[in-house]
Image: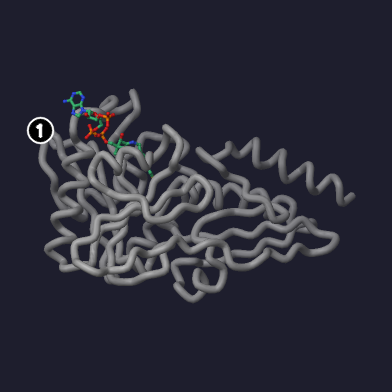
Amino acid sequence: MKIIDLESKHKDNYFHCLEEWSDEMKDAGDSKEKWYEKMKDRGLRVKLAEDDQGRICGMIQYVPSEYSFVDTAGFYIVKCIWVYGYKEGMGNQQKKGIGTQLIEAAEQDCRELDTNGLLVWGISMPFFMRASWFKKHGFKKIDKDNIRILLWKPFKEGVIPPKLVKKKKKLELIEGKVTVQAFVNGWCPASNIVYERMKKISEEFKEYIVFEYYDTSNKEVFDEWGVLDAVYLDGKVVQKGAPPSYEKLYSKVAKKVSRLK
Ligand SMILES: CC(C)(COP(=O)(O)OP(=O)(O)OC[C@H]1O[C@@H](n2cnc3c(N)ncnc32)[C@H](O)[C@@H]1OP(=O)(O)O)[C@@H](O)C(=O)NCCC(=O)NCCS
């Protein structure tokens, strides 16, 4: 097993969270690729774990902190770390030390880039990207927003811990219509799936729906709203964990629309 940099031949796999086999990923659209094209010139770093058979079994992606959901530049932040965890394809590769190698490689890289430190985020619950896993790797908690925890490892003396940017504006609903507001950054295919599904559903109900799209890879848009990735249906977030199915989202929207009639 070795840690390598992303090359052109890995891109499709990387754009699909190493899950090219997955039908679910077919709904993710091209937002990740567009995000990558923007971010590769803004300091995006991607490292991959390659096993002895040349298979990519893990990835970590990290960006300068000003392109994320924290209030301070000068750091790098891990957007996500993922070790392949499904029985499909190459099978579960977690708990073999691959995640440890990835986070250590990212940390080493960021030290060499002379940043103020490395930030990570995780959630306080025992699933998805757990904050507790990062704590075991020496990261300390510096902020919290609901279940989202921000942690850091400063590399320099006297640097001030960044804070999570929280939602800044109340969403305006439109009288007599169902409102769908999509904040799309592009970095996360799971969020992109929800956006694509809601876009399609909104198209089907277009005479009843006002669909607003916000491209938060544009920093001014993010700074105005404080929301990086979320789709709201009449002001309520539609995704809390894994992407809801097309059918589930459709029935939520249909229910809202039926109340208008
Ligand atoms: C969090 C994550 C990155 C950790 O990667 P990993 O490769 O499983 O991590 P490691 O193997 O280095 O460490 C995990 C555990 O395995 C144990 N371990 C490491 N090597 C081992 C080995 N050879 N044999 C048995 N156990 C081992 C470690 O002690 C560690 O124990 P812990 O659970 O008490 O912390 C991985 O589990 C993951 O991808 N989870 C999902 C995160 C996610 O949803 N990401 C997407 C976000 S957008």
Query: Residue 27 vs residue 33: left or right?
Result: right
Ligand 1 positioned in quadrant: top left
Circle 1 crowding by C-alpha within 10 Å: few under 14, some 14–19, many from 20: few
At 26% from the left edge and 67% from the top edge, which residue is drawn?
43
Q: Is residue 70 above or below residue 125?
A: below
Q: Residue furthest front?
A: 158
| Residue 161 place in picture, x, y as percent | 34, 63
At 45% from the left edge and 60% from the top edge, which residue is drawn?
164
Residue tagged 1: 52
| Residue 170 place in picture, x, y as percent | 67, 65
Q: Is residue 176 above or below residue 122?
A: below
Q: Nearer the viewer, residue 162 or 25?
A: 162
Q: Residue furthest right?
A: 261
Give the SS element for disc 1. loop
Q: Quadrant of residue 38?
A: bottom left
Query: Residue 50 vs residue 211: left or right?
Result: left
At 36% from the left edge and 50% from the top edge, which residue is drawn?
141
At 31% from the left edge and 58% from the top edge, which residue is drawn?
77
